[in-house]
Image: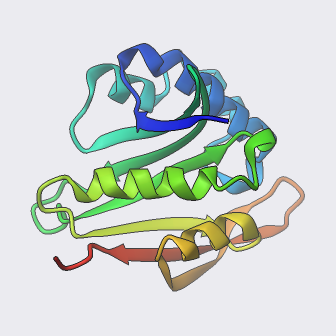
Amino acid sequence: MNITYRKLQPHHAAAYRAIRLEALYLFPQNFGSTHENESAKLKLAFENYIELQTPGKFIVGAFEGDTLIGICGFVRDEGKKNIHRGSIIQMYVKQQYNGKGIGLTLLNATVKEAFALPGVEQLALGVITLNTPAVTIYNKAGFTPFAVHHNYFKEDDGSYLHQQYMILHKPVD
């Protein structure tokens, strides 16, 4: 299996949409967006960002050949006092590729791209505490927990999910 990792380009927008909607459909508890809401949109926000190659907003893809099998996004904060920060978002690898180290490599590729942006010093993310595989990957990549937001998501059945926040600081050269 030959997996490559690269930032998505405008011609990848449709493949991004398909894998993003798949993630929301298969793992609704892990994301704040819903498949129902997002699939009703003509274009997802990141489809536009990919097509326009918006600075500070990108998705890194894991590819087997030309097939997109995983995504991991980055959004840079934009305010004058917080432009040194950004967030890792929308991490997902297709189920049949789980357990092969692809998620960690994809995350590391995204972190590398984010820290290559001038002035970016720290990356944050949020992960549902019950999503043990994701928490494990984030820990392996060097992210450290700093807070838990209890009752972050409320499910249709009335149960709650908690979100753990994690951070990674740019290594000092």
x and y percentages locating residue 103 in the rendered image:
61, 53
Q: How many marks?
A: 0
x and y percentages locating residue 125 in the rendered image:
47, 65
The front one of 94 and 164 is: 94
The front one of 115 and 54 is: 115
Seen at 33% across and 56% down, the residue is 112
The front one of 5 and 42 is: 5
x and y percentages locating residue 70 in the rendered image:
60, 39
**As drawn, 1 above or below 149:** above
x and y percentages locating residue 87 in the rendered image:
39, 59
- For this view, does 173 lie left or right of residue 122? left
| Farthest residue, direction front | 1
- For this view, does 73 lie left or right of residue 100? left
Seen at 43% across and 32% down, the residue is 46
Give the image's coloring scheme.
rainbow
Seen at 68% across and 36% down, the residue is 1
Is residue 87 visible to us here? yes
Is residue 131 visible to us here? no
**As drawn, 14 above or below 60:** above
